[in-house]
Amino acid sequence: MGSRSRARQVAAALGFVGLLLAALGAVMIVMVPSIIKQQVLKNVRIDPSSLSFNMWKEIPVPFYLSVYFFDVINPNEILQGQKPQVRERGPYVYREFRHKSNITFNDNDTVSFLEYRSYQFQPHKSRGLESDYIVIPNILVLSASVMMEDRPMSLKLIMTFAFSALGERAFVNRTVGEIMWGYEDPLIHLINKYFPNMFPFKGKFGLFAELNNSDSGLFTVFTGVKDFSRIHLVDKWNGLSKVNFWHSDQCNMINGTSGQMWAPFMTPESSLEFYSPEACRSMKLIYKEQGVFEGIPTFRFVAPNTLFANGSVYPPNEGFCPCMESGIQNVSTCRFNAPLFLSHPHFYNADPVLAEAVSGLHPNTEEHSLFLDIHPVTGIPMNCSVKLQLSLYIKSVKGIGVPRMPRASPAWPLSQTSFPAPTPHFFRTLSADSPPVPKSEPSHLPLPHACHTLHTPQYMFSRVHMYADTLRDGAAAEGTWGES
Protein backbone atom coordinates (compact mmCIF):
# COMPACT_ATOMS: atom_id res chain seq x y z
CA MET A 1 0.00 0.00 0.00
CA GLY A 2 1.33 3.47 -0.86
CA SER A 3 2.58 6.00 1.65
CA ARG A 4 -0.48 8.23 1.19
CA SER A 5 -2.85 5.38 1.93
CA ARG A 6 -0.79 4.38 4.95
CA ALA A 7 -0.81 7.97 6.17
CA ARG A 8 -4.59 8.04 5.89
CA GLN A 9 -4.81 4.83 7.92
CA VAL A 10 -2.57 6.17 10.65
CA ALA A 11 -4.60 9.38 10.75
CA ALA A 12 -7.82 7.39 11.04
CA ALA A 13 -6.30 5.17 13.69
CA LEU A 14 -5.36 8.16 15.80
CA GLY A 15 -8.83 9.56 15.28
CA PHE A 16 -10.41 9.76 18.68
CA VAL A 17 -7.46 10.77 20.81
CA GLY A 18 -6.46 13.31 18.19
CA LEU A 19 -10.01 14.64 18.06
CA LEU A 20 -10.26 14.82 21.82
CA LEU A 21 -6.92 16.56 22.19
CA ALA A 22 -7.86 18.95 19.42
CA ALA A 23 -11.09 19.74 21.20
CA LEU A 24 -9.38 20.26 24.53
CA GLY A 25 -5.85 21.24 23.65
CA ALA A 26 -6.60 24.80 22.57
CA VAL A 27 -8.01 25.62 25.97
CA MET A 28 -5.90 23.39 28.18
CA ILE A 29 -3.34 26.12 28.74
CA VAL A 30 -5.83 28.43 30.37
CA MET A 31 -8.15 25.91 31.96
CA VAL A 32 -7.71 24.76 35.53
CA PRO A 33 -7.17 21.01 36.05
CA SER A 34 -10.68 20.45 37.41
CA ILE A 35 -12.25 21.88 34.26
CA ILE A 36 -9.97 19.77 32.08
CA LYS A 37 -11.02 16.72 34.03
CA GLN A 38 -14.69 17.54 33.52
CA GLN A 39 -14.18 17.88 29.77
CA VAL A 40 -12.36 14.55 29.54
CA LEU A 41 -14.99 12.77 31.61
CA LYS A 42 -17.71 14.22 29.42
CA ASN A 43 -16.09 12.84 26.29
CA VAL A 44 -15.04 9.34 27.41
CA ARG A 45 -18.25 8.26 29.11
CA ILE A 46 -20.69 6.03 27.23
CA ASP A 47 -23.16 8.62 26.06
CA PRO A 48 -24.41 9.44 22.54
CA SER A 49 -23.22 13.01 23.03
CA SER A 50 -19.61 12.08 23.89
CA LEU A 51 -16.77 12.19 21.37
CA SER A 52 -15.91 8.54 22.03
CA PHE A 53 -19.40 7.09 21.60
CA ASN A 54 -19.20 6.26 17.89
CA MET A 55 -15.78 4.69 18.37
CA TRP A 56 -17.14 2.63 21.25
CA LYS A 57 -20.12 1.57 19.14
CA GLU A 58 -18.16 0.48 16.08
CA ILE A 59 -14.42 0.18 15.49
CA PRO A 60 -13.40 3.04 13.18
CA VAL A 61 -10.32 1.45 11.61
CA PRO A 62 -9.52 -1.96 10.08
CA PHE A 63 -8.91 -4.76 12.55
CA TYR A 64 -7.07 -7.93 11.50
CA LEU A 65 -6.85 -11.39 12.97
CA SER A 66 -3.76 -13.37 11.93
CA VAL A 67 -3.90 -17.10 12.49
CA TYR A 68 -0.84 -19.33 12.83
CA PHE A 69 -1.05 -23.11 12.73
CA PHE A 70 1.26 -25.65 14.28
CA ASP A 71 1.78 -28.22 11.53
CA VAL A 72 2.66 -31.70 12.81
CA ILE A 73 5.80 -32.88 11.04
CA ASN A 74 6.13 -36.44 12.35
CA PRO A 75 2.66 -37.91 13.05
CA ASN A 76 3.72 -41.50 12.28
CA GLU A 77 6.77 -41.28 14.55
CA ILE A 78 4.68 -39.77 17.34
CA LEU A 79 2.53 -42.89 17.32
CA GLN A 80 5.72 -44.88 17.87
CA GLY A 81 6.54 -42.85 20.97
CA GLN A 82 8.89 -40.25 19.53
CA LYS A 83 8.93 -36.60 20.53
CA PRO A 84 6.38 -34.47 18.62
CA GLN A 85 7.77 -32.01 16.08
CA VAL A 86 5.77 -29.03 14.86
CA ARG A 87 6.36 -25.96 12.73
CA GLU A 88 4.45 -22.73 12.82
CA ARG A 89 2.73 -21.76 9.56
CA GLY A 90 1.07 -18.54 8.63
CA PRO A 91 -0.12 -15.96 9.14
CA TYR A 92 -3.52 -16.51 7.59
CA VAL A 93 -4.99 -13.03 7.98
CA TYR A 94 -8.66 -12.15 8.38
CA ARG A 95 -10.30 -8.76 8.47
CA GLU A 96 -12.41 -8.65 11.58
CA PHE A 97 -15.59 -6.59 11.68
CA ARG A 98 -17.18 -5.71 15.03
CA HIS A 99 -20.26 -3.70 15.80
CA LYS A 100 -22.53 -3.31 18.79
CA SER A 101 -26.23 -3.94 18.53
CA ASN A 102 -29.24 -3.98 20.86
CA ILE A 103 -27.76 -1.00 22.72
CA THR A 104 -30.07 -0.27 25.65
CA PHE A 105 -29.50 2.45 28.25
CA ASN A 106 -30.82 1.39 31.66
CA ASP A 107 -32.05 3.46 34.62
CA ASN A 108 -29.16 2.41 36.89
CA ASP A 109 -26.44 4.24 34.91
CA THR A 110 -25.65 1.15 32.80
CA VAL A 111 -25.91 0.24 29.15
CA SER A 112 -26.49 -3.26 27.76
CA PHE A 113 -25.32 -4.42 24.34
CA LEU A 114 -24.40 -7.33 22.13
CA GLU A 115 -21.25 -7.10 20.03
CA TYR A 116 -21.23 -9.05 16.79
CA ARG A 117 -18.14 -10.07 14.85
CA SER A 118 -17.47 -11.49 11.42
CA TYR A 119 -14.33 -12.36 9.48
CA GLN A 120 -13.16 -12.08 5.86
CA PHE A 121 -10.00 -13.74 4.57
CA GLN A 122 -7.31 -11.35 3.28
CA PRO A 123 -5.11 -13.31 0.83
CA HIS A 124 -2.90 -10.30 0.02
CA LYS A 125 -1.90 -10.00 3.69
CA SER A 126 -1.47 -13.74 4.25
CA ARG A 127 1.42 -16.16 3.78
CA GLY A 128 -0.67 -18.93 2.32
CA LEU A 129 -4.18 -19.69 1.18
CA GLU A 130 -7.19 -21.21 2.88
CA SER A 131 -6.67 -24.18 0.55
CA ASP A 132 -3.32 -25.02 2.21
CA TYR A 133 -3.26 -28.39 3.98
CA ILE A 134 -2.23 -28.68 7.63
CA VAL A 135 -1.67 -31.83 9.71
CA ILE A 136 -3.09 -31.40 13.21
CA PRO A 137 -4.29 -33.73 15.98
CA ASN A 138 -7.85 -34.95 15.58
CA ILE A 139 -9.32 -32.88 18.35
CA LEU A 140 -12.70 -34.60 18.30
CA VAL A 141 -11.22 -38.08 18.71
CA LEU A 142 -8.55 -37.21 21.24
CA SER A 143 -10.68 -35.01 23.46
CA ALA A 144 -13.66 -37.36 23.31
CA SER A 145 -11.40 -40.20 24.43
CA VAL A 146 -10.20 -38.30 27.50
CA MET A 147 -13.77 -37.23 28.31
CA MET A 148 -14.83 -40.90 28.25
CA GLU A 149 -12.23 -41.94 30.84
CA ASP A 150 -14.70 -42.27 33.73
CA ARG A 151 -17.60 -43.62 31.68
CA PRO A 152 -18.69 -47.29 31.86
CA MET A 153 -16.62 -49.78 29.90
CA SER A 154 -19.62 -50.54 27.69
CA LEU A 155 -19.67 -46.95 26.44
CA LYS A 156 -15.92 -47.05 25.84
CA LEU A 157 -16.35 -50.12 23.68
CA ILE A 158 -19.05 -48.33 21.70
CA MET A 159 -16.68 -45.39 21.23
CA THR A 160 -13.91 -47.76 20.09
CA PHE A 161 -16.21 -49.36 17.56
CA ALA A 162 -17.34 -45.94 16.36
CA PHE A 163 -13.75 -44.77 15.80
CA SER A 164 -13.06 -47.87 13.75
CA ALA A 165 -16.30 -47.85 11.77
CA LEU A 166 -16.02 -44.16 10.94
CA GLY A 167 -12.36 -44.38 9.96
CA GLU A 168 -11.32 -41.81 12.56
CA ARG A 169 -7.61 -41.16 12.97
CA ALA A 170 -5.42 -39.56 15.61
CA PHE A 171 -4.24 -36.91 13.14
CA VAL A 172 -6.07 -35.24 10.29
CA ASN A 173 -4.82 -33.49 7.15
CA ARG A 174 -7.26 -30.63 6.50
CA THR A 175 -7.23 -27.32 4.70
CA VAL A 176 -6.92 -24.07 6.59
CA GLY A 177 -10.46 -23.17 5.57
CA GLU A 178 -11.81 -26.44 6.94
CA ILE A 179 -9.92 -26.14 10.21
CA MET A 180 -11.07 -22.55 10.66
CA TRP A 181 -14.70 -22.66 9.57
CA GLY A 182 -15.63 -26.30 9.80
CA TYR A 183 -15.81 -29.61 7.98
CA GLU A 184 -18.23 -32.50 8.05
CA ASP A 185 -17.26 -35.28 10.43
CA PRO A 186 -19.58 -38.24 11.04
CA LEU A 187 -18.26 -38.46 14.61
CA ILE A 188 -20.05 -35.20 15.46
CA HIS A 189 -23.40 -36.63 14.41
CA LEU A 190 -22.73 -39.81 16.38
CA ILE A 191 -21.74 -37.93 19.54
CA ASN A 192 -24.74 -35.61 19.31
CA LYS A 193 -27.03 -38.62 18.93
CA TYR A 194 -25.77 -40.70 21.87
CA PHE A 195 -24.15 -37.98 24.02
CA PRO A 196 -26.25 -34.85 23.46
CA ASN A 197 -24.79 -31.57 24.68
CA MET A 198 -21.28 -33.03 25.01
CA PHE A 199 -20.06 -30.61 22.33
CA PRO A 200 -21.59 -27.31 21.12
CA PHE A 201 -21.19 -28.32 17.49
CA LYS A 202 -24.31 -29.47 15.72
CA GLY A 203 -23.07 -29.45 12.15
CA LYS A 204 -19.56 -28.79 10.92
CA PHE A 205 -16.60 -28.87 13.25
CA GLY A 206 -14.09 -25.99 13.05
CA LEU A 207 -11.91 -23.93 15.35
CA PHE A 208 -13.70 -20.66 14.56
CA ALA A 209 -16.98 -22.17 13.39
CA GLU A 210 -18.85 -20.77 16.39
CA LEU A 211 -17.13 -17.37 16.26
CA ASN A 212 -18.04 -16.06 12.83
CA ASN A 213 -21.23 -14.02 12.73
CA SER A 214 -21.71 -14.43 16.47
CA ASP A 215 -21.76 -12.28 19.59
CA SER A 216 -19.76 -12.51 22.82
CA GLY A 217 -22.73 -12.45 25.15
CA LEU A 218 -24.87 -9.70 26.64
CA PHE A 219 -22.68 -7.18 28.44
CA THR A 220 -24.08 -4.61 30.85
CA VAL A 221 -21.53 -1.94 31.78
CA PHE A 222 -21.59 1.33 33.69
CA THR A 223 -21.71 4.44 31.49
CA GLY A 224 -20.01 6.82 33.93
CA VAL A 225 -22.66 9.48 33.29
CA LYS A 226 -23.95 9.52 36.88
CA ASP A 227 -21.06 7.85 38.69
CA PHE A 228 -17.64 8.40 37.14
CA SER A 229 -15.93 6.02 39.60
CA ARG A 230 -17.54 3.01 37.87
CA ILE A 231 -17.11 4.10 34.26
CA HIS A 232 -16.80 1.15 31.81
CA LEU A 233 -16.90 -1.46 34.62
CA VAL A 234 -18.96 -4.57 33.89
CA ASP A 235 -22.12 -4.80 35.95
CA LYS A 236 -23.32 -8.10 34.49
CA TRP A 237 -22.56 -10.54 31.69
CA ASN A 238 -25.51 -12.53 30.37
CA GLY A 239 -27.41 -11.36 33.43
CA LEU A 240 -24.80 -12.73 35.85
CA SER A 241 -22.79 -10.72 38.36
CA LYS A 242 -20.43 -13.69 38.75
CA VAL A 243 -19.86 -16.97 36.93
CA ASN A 244 -19.92 -20.47 38.40
CA PHE A 245 -17.18 -22.17 36.38
CA TRP A 246 -14.55 -22.17 39.10
CA HIS A 247 -14.05 -23.39 42.66
CA SER A 248 -13.68 -20.11 44.55
CA ASP A 249 -15.63 -16.88 44.80
CA GLN A 250 -12.55 -14.89 43.84
CA CYS A 251 -12.01 -16.80 40.60
CA ASN A 252 -15.71 -16.56 39.70
CA MET A 253 -15.85 -12.76 40.03
CA ILE A 254 -16.57 -10.64 36.94
CA ASN A 255 -14.13 -7.78 37.42
CA GLY A 256 -12.97 -4.85 35.35
CA THR A 257 -14.27 -3.69 31.99
CA SER A 258 -15.35 -5.54 28.86
CA GLY A 259 -11.88 -4.96 27.41
CA GLN A 260 -12.68 -1.90 25.28
CA MET A 261 -11.92 1.18 27.38
CA TRP A 262 -10.86 1.89 30.93
CA ALA A 263 -11.29 4.72 33.41
CA PRO A 264 -9.33 7.88 32.56
CA PHE A 265 -6.62 9.58 34.63
CA MET A 266 -4.48 6.53 35.24
CA THR A 267 -1.36 6.48 37.40
CA PRO A 268 1.50 3.97 37.70
CA GLU A 269 -0.44 2.53 40.63
CA SER A 270 -3.38 1.68 38.36
CA SER A 271 -4.05 -1.81 37.01
CA LEU A 272 -6.01 -3.01 33.99
CA GLU A 273 -8.71 -5.59 34.59
CA PHE A 274 -11.20 -7.00 32.10
CA TYR A 275 -13.57 -9.94 31.75
CA SER A 276 -13.08 -12.30 28.79
CA PRO A 277 -16.07 -14.54 27.97
CA GLU A 278 -13.86 -16.85 25.89
CA ALA A 279 -11.41 -17.32 28.74
CA CYS A 280 -14.35 -17.55 31.17
CA ARG A 281 -12.54 -15.36 33.69
CA SER A 282 -11.35 -11.91 34.58
CA MET A 283 -7.72 -10.96 33.96
CA LYS A 284 -5.62 -8.26 35.59
CA LEU A 285 -2.61 -6.58 34.00
CA ILE A 286 -0.04 -4.55 35.94
CA TYR A 287 1.81 -1.33 35.14
CA LYS A 288 5.30 -1.71 33.65
CA GLU A 289 6.50 1.55 32.10
CA GLN A 290 5.71 4.79 30.31
CA GLY A 291 6.05 5.06 26.56
CA VAL A 292 5.00 6.96 23.46
CA PHE A 293 2.87 5.71 20.56
CA GLU A 294 2.56 7.88 17.44
CA GLY A 295 3.54 10.88 19.54
CA ILE A 296 0.93 10.20 22.23
CA PRO A 297 2.09 9.30 25.78
CA THR A 298 1.10 5.83 27.00
CA PHE A 299 1.30 3.56 30.01
CA ARG A 300 2.24 -0.05 29.27
CA PHE A 301 0.47 -2.76 31.24
CA VAL A 302 1.65 -6.37 31.11
CA ALA A 303 0.52 -9.76 32.37
CA PRO A 304 2.00 -10.69 35.76
CA ASN A 305 3.96 -13.94 35.96
CA THR A 306 1.15 -15.31 38.13
CA LEU A 307 -1.62 -14.92 35.53
CA PHE A 308 -1.65 -18.64 34.66
CA ALA A 309 0.40 -19.94 37.59
CA ASN A 310 -0.98 -23.03 39.29
CA GLY A 311 -2.32 -23.07 42.84
CA SER A 312 0.89 -24.28 44.42
CA VAL A 313 2.88 -21.37 42.94
CA TYR A 314 0.15 -18.75 43.43
CA PRO A 315 -2.52 -19.79 46.00
CA PRO A 316 -5.25 -17.39 44.74
CA ASN A 317 -5.33 -19.43 41.50
CA GLU A 318 -6.24 -22.58 43.40
CA GLY A 319 -9.85 -21.94 42.40
CA PHE A 320 -8.93 -22.63 38.76
CA CYS A 321 -7.64 -26.10 39.61
CA PRO A 322 -7.31 -29.07 39.20
CA CYS A 323 -3.95 -27.82 37.97
CA MET A 324 -0.99 -29.30 36.17
CA GLU A 325 2.34 -27.64 35.41
CA SER A 326 2.47 -23.96 36.31
CA GLY A 327 1.79 -21.60 33.44
CA ILE A 328 -1.26 -23.37 31.99
CA GLN A 329 -4.78 -22.89 33.34
CA ASN A 330 -7.36 -25.65 33.27
CA VAL A 331 -10.47 -24.30 31.48
CA SER A 332 -12.30 -27.62 31.09
CA THR A 333 -15.10 -26.59 33.45
CA CYS A 334 -16.16 -23.80 31.10
CA ARG A 335 -15.53 -25.76 27.88
CA PHE A 336 -17.96 -28.68 28.29
CA ASN A 337 -15.38 -30.60 30.35
CA ALA A 338 -13.01 -31.00 27.42
CA PRO A 339 -9.38 -31.21 28.60
CA LEU A 340 -8.34 -27.70 27.59
CA PHE A 341 -5.68 -25.44 29.08
CA LEU A 342 -5.09 -21.73 28.59
CA SER A 343 -1.61 -20.18 28.49
CA HIS A 344 0.64 -17.70 26.75
CA PRO A 345 1.82 -18.69 23.23
CA HIS A 346 4.53 -21.35 23.03
CA PHE A 347 4.12 -21.80 26.81
CA TYR A 348 5.87 -18.53 27.46
CA ASN A 349 6.26 -17.90 31.22
CA ALA A 350 5.26 -21.51 31.94
CA ASP A 351 7.13 -24.48 33.37
CA PRO A 352 9.96 -25.13 30.85
CA VAL A 353 9.01 -28.81 30.69
CA LEU A 354 5.98 -27.87 28.57
CA ALA A 355 7.89 -26.27 25.71
CA GLU A 356 10.70 -28.82 25.95
CA ALA A 357 8.24 -31.67 25.36
CA VAL A 358 7.50 -30.53 21.80
CA SER A 359 10.14 -29.66 19.20
CA GLY A 360 9.39 -26.42 17.38
CA LEU A 361 8.28 -24.26 20.29
CA HIS A 362 10.40 -21.18 20.97
CA PRO A 363 8.88 -19.02 23.71
CA ASN A 364 10.28 -15.51 23.90
CA THR A 365 9.24 -12.19 25.38
CA GLU A 366 9.15 -10.17 22.17
CA GLU A 367 6.75 -12.43 20.28
CA HIS A 368 4.70 -14.06 23.02
CA SER A 369 4.29 -11.61 25.90
CA LEU A 370 1.00 -9.86 26.56
CA PHE A 371 0.72 -6.08 26.86
CA LEU A 372 -1.60 -3.10 26.46
CA ASP A 373 -0.50 0.48 25.88
CA ILE A 374 -3.11 2.87 27.29
CA HIS A 375 -3.45 6.64 26.93
CA PRO A 376 -3.49 7.44 30.68
CA VAL A 377 -5.62 10.61 30.42
CA THR A 378 -8.52 9.03 28.48
CA GLY A 379 -8.14 5.33 29.35
CA ILE A 380 -8.23 4.41 25.66
CA PRO A 381 -6.00 1.58 24.31
CA MET A 382 -3.47 2.81 21.78
CA ASN A 383 -1.58 -0.40 21.06
CA CYS A 384 -2.06 -3.87 22.43
CA SER A 385 -1.01 -7.45 21.98
CA VAL A 386 -3.09 -9.95 23.90
CA LYS A 387 -1.81 -13.38 23.00
CA LEU A 388 -3.24 -16.59 24.40
CA GLN A 389 -2.92 -20.26 23.59
CA LEU A 390 -5.34 -23.09 24.23
CA SER A 391 -3.90 -26.56 24.67
CA LEU A 392 -5.49 -29.97 24.55
CA TYR A 393 -4.50 -32.58 27.13
CA ILE A 394 -4.27 -36.06 25.64
CA LYS A 395 -3.51 -39.34 27.32
CA SER A 396 -4.07 -43.05 26.99
CA VAL A 397 -7.50 -44.11 28.22
CA LYS A 398 -8.07 -47.70 29.27
CA GLY A 399 -10.85 -49.28 27.25
CA ILE A 400 -10.63 -46.91 24.27
CA GLY A 401 -9.36 -48.90 21.33
CA VAL A 402 -7.10 -46.39 19.68
CA PRO A 403 -3.54 -47.25 18.58
CA ARG A 404 -0.80 -47.24 21.18
CA MET A 405 -0.50 -43.96 23.02
CA PRO A 406 2.54 -41.85 22.21
CA ARG A 407 4.99 -40.86 24.90
CA ALA A 408 3.35 -38.34 27.22
CA SER A 409 3.86 -34.77 26.12
CA PRO A 410 2.47 -31.90 28.21
CA ALA A 411 1.02 -29.91 25.34
CA TRP A 412 0.71 -29.65 21.62
CA PRO A 413 0.80 -26.28 19.86
CA LEU A 414 -1.93 -26.29 17.27
CA SER A 415 -2.50 -22.64 16.64
CA GLN A 416 -1.99 -19.22 18.09
CA THR A 417 -3.43 -15.77 17.74
CA SER A 418 -2.01 -12.36 18.48
CA PHE A 419 -1.98 -8.67 17.63
CA PRO A 420 -0.09 -7.48 15.80
CA ALA A 421 0.90 -10.45 13.70
CA PRO A 422 4.57 -11.39 13.91
CA THR A 423 6.78 -11.42 10.88
CA PRO A 424 5.34 -14.08 8.54
CA HIS A 425 7.37 -17.05 7.45
CA PHE A 426 7.01 -19.50 4.57
CA PHE A 427 6.44 -23.15 5.41
CA ARG A 428 6.11 -26.20 3.24
CA THR A 429 2.49 -27.04 2.58
CA LEU A 430 1.42 -30.66 2.67
CA SER A 431 -0.29 -31.73 -0.50
CA ALA A 432 -3.94 -32.65 -0.54
CA ASP A 433 -3.11 -36.21 -1.51
CA SER A 434 -0.71 -36.80 1.36
CA PRO A 435 -1.12 -40.32 2.74
CA PRO A 436 -3.60 -40.60 5.59
CA VAL A 437 -2.16 -40.46 9.07
CA PRO A 438 -2.73 -43.47 11.34
CA LYS A 439 -4.93 -43.24 14.39
CA SER A 440 -3.49 -42.67 17.83
CA GLU A 441 -4.56 -42.21 21.39
CA PRO A 442 -4.87 -38.95 23.22
CA SER A 443 -1.94 -37.21 24.88
CA HIS A 444 -1.24 -33.75 26.22
CA LEU A 445 -1.00 -31.33 23.30
CA PRO A 446 -1.07 -27.51 23.28
CA LEU A 447 -3.69 -26.24 20.92
CA PRO A 448 -3.68 -22.73 19.55
CA HIS A 449 -2.82 -19.48 21.23
CA ALA A 450 -4.72 -16.36 20.41
CA CYS A 451 -4.09 -12.71 20.85
CA HIS A 452 -5.57 -9.42 19.86
CA THR A 453 -3.51 -6.33 19.34
CA LEU A 454 -4.71 -2.96 18.42
CA HIS A 455 -2.70 -0.08 17.13
CA THR A 456 -3.99 3.41 17.55
CA PRO A 457 -6.82 4.71 19.64
CA GLN A 458 -9.35 2.06 19.12
CA TYR A 459 -10.29 -0.39 21.76
CA MET A 460 -8.82 -3.74 22.46
CA PHE A 461 -10.56 -7.04 22.63
CA SER A 462 -8.84 -9.97 24.20
CA ARG A 463 -11.01 -12.70 22.80
CA VAL A 464 -9.74 -16.17 22.82
CA HIS A 465 -12.58 -18.33 21.67
CA MET A 466 -11.46 -21.88 21.65
CA TYR A 467 -13.63 -24.89 21.83
CA ALA A 468 -12.55 -27.90 23.72
CA ASP A 469 -11.32 -30.05 21.01
CA THR A 470 -10.95 -27.54 18.29
CA LEU A 471 -9.60 -24.10 18.47
CA ARG A 472 -6.76 -22.70 20.33
CA ASP A 473 -5.45 -26.05 19.68
CA GLY A 474 -3.61 -25.98 16.48
CA ALA A 475 -4.21 -22.62 14.99
CA ALA A 476 -2.61 -19.36 15.87
CA ALA A 477 -4.40 -16.14 15.45
CA GLU A 478 -3.15 -12.63 15.63
CA GLY A 479 -4.69 -9.30 14.91
CA THR A 480 -3.69 -5.77 14.10
CA TRP A 481 -5.43 -2.45 13.90
CA GLY A 482 -5.30 -0.37 10.76
CA GLU A 483 -2.08 -1.84 9.44
CA SER A 484 -1.41 -2.49 5.78
Image (cartoon, rainbow, N blue to C red):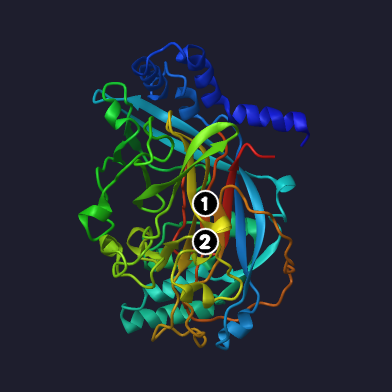
The x and y percentages for residue 75 are 61, 79
Q: What x and y, as percent, mark residue 473? A: 51, 64
Q: Which of the 4 image quadrants contains residue 103?
A: top left
Quadrant that contains the C terminus: top right
Amino acid carrying label 1: it is Cys
Mark 2 — residue? 345
The residue that disc 1 covers is 451
Count of picture labels: 2
Q: Are dots 1 and 2 in contact, CB under 8 Å?
A: yes
> Mark 1 Cα within 10 Å, few/some/many (few <14, many 20+)?
many
Q: Secondary structure at mark 2?
A: helix
Q: Which of these two is toward me, 34 or 388? A: 34
Image quadrant of residue 67? bottom right
Residue drawn at the location 46% of the way across and 15% of the way down: 28
Dot 2 amino acid type: Pro
The picture places residue 151, in percent across and down from the top left corner, at: 32, 77
Q: Which mark is drawn over residue 8?
A: none
Q: CA distance from mark 1 to mark 2?
A: 9 Å
Residue at 51% from the left image edge and 65% from the top image edge: 447
Compared with 250, 88 (above or below) is below
Residue 7 visible in the picture: yes
Left of 373 or right of it: where is 45?
left
383 relative to 159 in the view: left or right = right
Q: Is residue 88 left or right of residue 261?
A: right
Residue 14 in the image: above or below residue 82: above
Residue 204 in sight in this render: no
